[in-house]
Amino acid sequence: MNKILHHSVTLRCETGRAFGLFTISRQVESWLIKPFSEKGFAEIEPVTGGKYELFWDTQNKQENSTIGCHITALAEGEFLSFDWKGPTEFKSIMNNTEPLTQVTVFFIPVADSSTHVHLIHSGWGSSPEWEAARTYFEKAWNSAFENLRVMINGK
């Protein structure tokens, strides 16, 4: 079985704007946090080694967050790679492993000033618990990318 998750969307915006949707805290909040948690927020430092922390539960920042995650690689407007943690139900496997799962996002310009965005989420284990986490994120990334598509492209 292919353990890597791959999601893609074509956004009707320039590559720089698409890149910002993944690297500017307020923009990430608009499609990846607020639709799921009204009071959630992001703390992103768009440099290699910088924070990539998203918080869905503001009452307990240790739960349902990516606290402690960092950007592992970055090329402005081209790609972004960062650590990723799971929600409370997958905390025991996803948040206490070394290395953490990894998300890499590629931004590919299209001739009509649009951008193809490809997200790859890798690092999944092979136990039934890991498979449940992978299945959860298959659905979560689908939902998040639909939020992103509608926000930029409209219905």
Image (tube, rainbow, N blue to C red):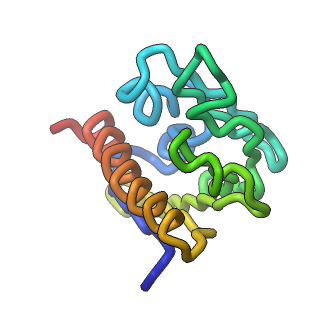
Residue 118 picture location, percent across and down: 46, 63
Residue 134 picture location, percent across and down: 46, 63
Query: For residue 135, which quarter of the picture?
Result: bottom left
Tell me if I can see residue 34 in this picture: yes
Position of the C terminus by quadrant: top left
Q: Is residue 145 above or below residue 129?
A: above
- The reply, left or right, for residue 32 in relation to residue 19 is left
Residue 107 picture location, percent across and down: 51, 59
Q: Is residue 151 above or below residue 103?
A: above
Residue 52 picture location, percent across and down: 69, 40
Residue at 55 percent across and 39 percent down: it is 88
Residue at 44 percent across and 58 percent down: it is 117
Query: For residue 30, which quarter of the picture?
Result: top left
Residue at 67 percent across and 57 percent down: it is 81
Q: Is residue 3 above or below residue 120?
A: below
Q: Nearer the viewer, residue 8 or 124?
A: 124
Position of the N terminus by quadrant: bottom left
Residue at 61 percent across and 46 percent down: it is 91
Residue found at the very far left of the displayed protein: 155
